[in-house]
């Protein structure tokens, strides 16, 4: 019982901190063009079948994915072209992808409902998803780990814990998260993009490619 209580307390802390994610000084995006999918697959594969290595949205972005370091559940990469996999979401069989809104997350708002995105794994395997929903929330106390949130579409008010389960307890799905910049505050709100799996596309590794 004590172990379960400690695990729950740890999870609640992760939930609170991940919705805080205070910004650092802004850095410019590199503005590079999106490569063809086959080329991007070659760039990110490393032979590790279970390791998520990239996320690709045709004509929008192609970002490598990094995992959170062990013991750092609130880590989000500050590299301009990197997306971070949210470890706590994996406990609910959801792929959570995090990025600051002044770095890779800036491109998230260019996605559209019905658009396909691809997850690329270390062995070149591809999982295909379709974007089904955008959810936007205002953080009532943007700099507080106990902030409540208001759904900008419905007006519903949620705690950070309720919001976590609303967007990350989606078994088999993908949730992209970044902050909403408004009223001069980079952390004014949160944007979540929800995608669900569709049949994998039969895309093979480029001829002659090697893991690296």
Image (cartoon, rainbow, N blue to C red):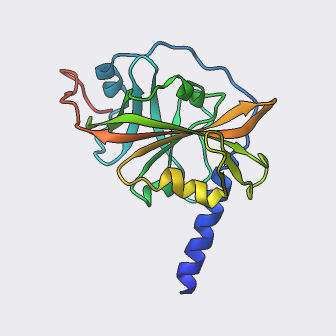
Question: Residue at the spot x=66%, y=20% of the render?
Answer: 28
Question: Residue at the spot x=47%, y=43% of the render?
Answer: 175
Please state the total of marks drawn on the protein image.
0
**Residue 166 position (above or below residue 98):** below
Q: Quadrant of residue 22?
A: top right
Is 206 left or right of 35, judged from the image as shown? left
**Residue 30 in sight:** yes
**Residue 51 position (above or below residue 119):** below
Front position in the image: 19 or 6: 19
Question: Residue at the spot x=72%, y=31% of the render?
Answer: 181
Q: Residue furthest bottom?
A: 1
Front position in the image: 199 or 137: 137
Q: Quadrant of the C terminus?
A: top left
Residue 108 at x, y percent in the picture: 54, 29
Q: Residue furthest right?
A: 184
Is 52 left or right of 180, judged from the image as shown? left
**Residue 71 position (above or below residue 3):** above
Is 109 left or right of 36, judged from the image as shown? right
Residue 10 at x, y percent in the picture: 61, 68
Q: Quadrant of residue 136?
A: top right
Residue 86 at x, y percent in the picture: 51, 49
Question: Residue at the spot x=57%, y=72% of the render?
Answer: 8
Q: Residue furthest front?
A: 154
Is 20 left or right of 95, judged from the image as shown? right
**Residue 23 in sight:** no
């Amino acid at each position: 019982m004590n172990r379960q209580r400690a695990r729950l307390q740890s999870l609640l802390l992760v939930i609170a901190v991940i919705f805080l994610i205070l910004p650092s000084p802004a850095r410019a995006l590199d503005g590079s063009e999106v490569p063809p999918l086959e080329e991007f697959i070659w760039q990110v594969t490393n032979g590790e079948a279970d390791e998520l290595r990239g996320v690709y949205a045709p004509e929008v972005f192609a970002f490598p994915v990094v995992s959170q370091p062990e013991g750092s559940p609130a880590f989000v990469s500050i590299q301009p072209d990197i997306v971070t996999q949210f470890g706590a979401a994996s406990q609910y069989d959801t792929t959570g992808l995090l990025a600051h809104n002044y770095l890779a997350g800036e491109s998230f708002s260019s996605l559209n409902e019905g658009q396909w995105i691809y997850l690329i794994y270390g062995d070149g395997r591809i999982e295909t998803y379709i974007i089904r929903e955008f959810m936007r929330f205002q953080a009532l106390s943007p700099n507080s780990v106990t902030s409540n949130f208001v759904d900008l579409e419905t007006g519903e008010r949620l705690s950070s814990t309720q919001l976590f389960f609303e967007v990350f307890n989606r078994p088999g799905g993908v949730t992209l998260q970044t902050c909403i910049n408004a009223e001069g505050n980079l952390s004014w709100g949160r944007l979540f993009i929800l995608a669900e799996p569709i049949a994998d596309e039969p895309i093979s590794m480029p001829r002659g490619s090697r893991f690296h």
